[in-house]
Image (cartoon, rainbow, N blue to C red):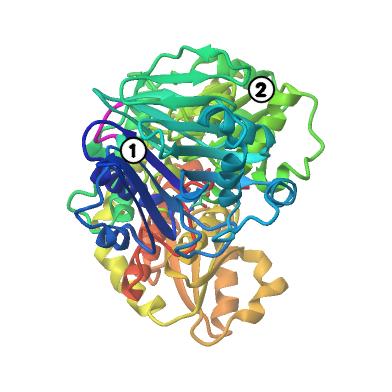
Amino acid sequence: MCGIVGIVGKENATDILVQGLEKLEYRGYDSAGIFVTGVNEQDHLVKSLGRIADLRARIGQEVQGTVGIGHTRWATHGKPSERNAHPHTAGDHQFILVHNGVIENFEEIKQEFLQGEQLAGETDTEIVVHLIAHFSKEAPNTKEAFKKALAVIKGSYAFALINKNDPETIYVAKNKSPLLIGLGEEFNVICSDAMAMLSQTNRFVEIADGELVTVKADKIEIEDETGTIVCRDSYEAQLDLSDIEKGTYPYYMLKEIDDQPAVMRRIILEYTDQVGRTTIDQTIIEKITESDRVYVVACGTSYHAGWVGKTIIEKVAGIPVEVHLSSEFSYNMPLLSDNPFFIFLSQSGETADSRQVLVQINDLGFPSLTLTNVPGSTLSREAMYTLLLHAGPEIAVASTKAYTAQIAVLAVLAKAIGDKKASPVSKAFDVAHELSVIASVMETIIDDKITISQLVEDYLAVTRNAFYIGRGTDYYVSMEAALKLKEISYIQAEGFAAGELKHGTIALIEEGTPVFGVITDEKTAAHTRGNLKEVESRGAHNFVISLASLAKETDQVILPDVHPLLTSLVSIVPTQLIAYFATLQRGYDVDKPRNLAKSVTVE
Ligand code: M6R
């Protein structure tokens, strides 16, 4: 989703801003822009529809400045266009603003304060910069005008504001949308994601909702809602620039698929000791053990990981688990048990739908744990406890290693709770050993990706749609496999409970429709094979992914056997590769699918 970068310094900032925006490309966007000022009293506003490369092509030698802000926009209000791209200006171009988030009362603001005002586009952001210009007529300075505007605005935002008559300062404020200050020698930066400015600094300062920060080259000043100056320590980002480079890989997605065995091994190291005991903080385990029901709340791929996690926790730890979509939960809260415990699954830790639920849960006083890949992310800061996924940065929009990391960490968590409750299933579940087996099996599948690439040509070269079917955990994997395929290859794909197809959806099976069956559970294998026969006799082109002990010679992908509770960790890998190769063969950008954002920071 939208990204923000900014810098106040002494050197030319143009390239730093554009490089910062390039680092945010993975989040998804449709237009971009920068504003720079501070050299020879010249200022420059450059915007472009499309990629950062298009923006770069428009930036001439003369576009120089020591102070600047930049933005990647993912359209919400107003279609993707140059005039709707940020930065937006007002007050005869005196005020320049970039914004992430959504202003809920922008229509009311327009009616009350901006009647007759000429607007260039349709964005909610443009209303805000005009509002600041409006208040600046009566306010003593930019900060006071900004504060007056903030007092009127309702919604989520991260703002960066420049007054070009005071070109040595950037004013920033946030509510619900992420924004960080990065500290440098004779410069300071701002960014919505630390990755954008890692090439400049790895020391960052967090900003809390409701704070306003004045950023200059040699100092920053944080003010809370009451106007009190806040002192806050900086922290070192635990990120390495090399973690966010593709290296020799053509796409991040392929690198991230290949990373998965190493991620499994890292999770073993992080969460178990040398004799295989779990090392998760016992206060978390006690809190979960005291609860009568666990509620997993998540979106997209994380939601699918939640379903697999439910099975593992229920079987190993014996606690009932419900899995909910964040976007539904917040408006339609189910009847909760007496003593609930909430687990938020989120790769980014910034998903607005999940955060909305966390705010409600915190208001109700219920305990919560976030499993996230991003330390210091909003969901991590606001939940009672955090467990990190240790998957390393995930850049491709299509989530792969975060999914398997979530399941692996949930498995360790299940083991820790089960051991605390002296569950016999848990006693027999050597999670560290089983995850190390998983890592080796993942490597075997990944090493043979050429076979999958060839099969994809046979099955998906021309089709418009496809189905994944399975039962139990294989159904949950099917949902995730279908999401992966549709989000990057644009093949209309559905993940179905194998037994449910005949209750309606089987009507869509035609001659040649690809149907992928996932078979890793001996209790359901025969039934799923029966369902595959049903679709085959109606023309389906069947593709079977099975475990070796359940395989037939004719199956397309046969996976080595692994622990029955962890089969999803290996059956998902060929489906990730299927999505990858189908997308590549269709000539689409694997890492940046249309319309999608990596971190979905609007509800
Ligand atoms: O960062 P989160 O895990 O909270 O993100 C949730 C979804 O937006 C995300 O999983 C999305 O579905 C991915 N693009 C799927 O590949």
| Rendering coords of residue 452 (x, y %) | 32, 66
Residue at x-position 43% and y-position 33%: 374
SS under mark 1: helix
Picture quadrant where residue 501 is located: bottom right
Q: Nearer the viewer, mark 2 or mark 1?
A: 1
Is ligand 1 within 8 Å of the beta carbon of the residue shown at mark 2?
A: no
Foreground pick, 297 / 438: 297
Could you tell me if residue 207 is visible in this image? no
Whether 199 is among the magenta residues is yes
Picture quadrant where residue 543 is located: bottom left
Q: Point out which mark residue 367 bears.
A: 2
| Rendering coords of residue 215 (x, y %) | 40, 27
Q: Which residue carries the number 1 mark? A: 195
* Residue stretch rendered in magenta on the structure: 198-202
**What's the residue type where badge 2 is placed?**
Pro
Residue 35 higher or lower than 194, as above or below? below
Residue at x-position 46% and y-position 12%: 231
Indicate left or right for 323 with 272 as reference.
Answer: right
| Rendering coords of residue 379 (x, y %) | 55, 31
Residue at x-position 29% and y-position 48%: 18
